Image: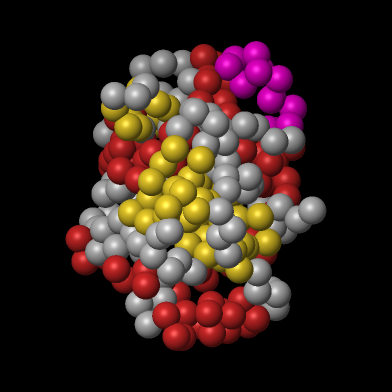
Amino acid sequence: MAQKLFHIFRNTPLGRETLLQSIYFCRQMGVAPKVYIPESTKFLMYFENDVVQVDLDASYLNDPDTAVLHAEELLKEARIEPDFFRPKNYTASTLPDVPTNFEFMCCPRSVSDLSSKIGLGYIGPRVRRIIQAARFPVLITSPVFKPWNRISVFFGGSANAVNALRLGIRIAKITGMALQVYTQAGKKKEETYRAIVRENGLEETLNSVLDRWRFFHKGRLENNLYEVPHDTLVVMGAYGHGVIRDIMFGSTMEKIQSTISNNLLIAGPKYTVVG
């Protein structure tokens, strides 16, 4: 069975850009898009330890008579056979259940607020809940379609950063693209981070795809982010803070996602490493 990326289609110009980004990701990764054209503004996602109700804004229901046609056109242009998700189970008549057995999911930075309200540094609470609960990585797209031709992993040494590094290595192997690693080290020695990689058995496989490992010992992270290429897919890990607080990316991650406009692939605390 082919691996799938779940995509919620918004039948607007910005929604077109997001679907184009999903299509590009799928072609690079060898996975197939599963496109959902919602008929209501709410649906449920049942995760192992959480149920997330996703509340869409009305633009997701825009011009329903042309939505399927527009999505099909974009998929066929990419020589991808359209595959649409149609809910079979409903918690209520207007509350469809969406499965969570996908390998990836694509989200804009927010799925529940009008695009005019979305700032670069704003990731909506529903997207954060999905990241917190999902065993799959979540692709958060740039505002407009932006191809990428390399992989960049931000590595701070935590367990979630190790998972993100594994994910980045996996993507580099599948795509054949070069991998870059970035670490805001400050006064810490580079060997501290390299030792973590060795301890997790990743040194050899990392070296097989690594183009460069850039350590920042000086300067603010926000300023150092200028060194990150605009045409790279940024891979990061996020961590959870329990049921009271939704999802906190940590100070480093918050700075990264609010500063750069690259496509982000985020592995949350429940992400299950594949390969």
Q: What stretch is highlighted in magenta?
A: 195-207
Image position, residue 5 (x, y; %): 60, 55
The residue lying toward the viewer, choosing from 257 and 104, is 104
Image position, residue 157 (x, y; %): 49, 21
Q: Residue at x 66, y 39 (%)?
A: 169
Quarter of the view holding residue 112: bottom left
Image position, residue 164 (x, y; %): 55, 34
The residue lying toward the viewer, choosing from 190 and 40, is 40
- Reply above or below: 169 against 95: above
**Does residue 230 appear to the left or right of 270 in the view shown?**
left
Image position, residue 44 (x, y; %): 45, 48
Q: Residue at x 37, y 69 (%)?
A: 60
- Reply above or below: 66 against 253: below
Q: Which residue is drawn at 63% across and 45% down?
A: 101
Residue 209 shows in this picture: yes
Q: Quadrant of the C terminus?
A: top right
The majority secondary structure of the magenta stretch comes to: helix
Answer whether residue 179 is magenta in the image.
Answer: no
Residue lying furthest left in this view? 117
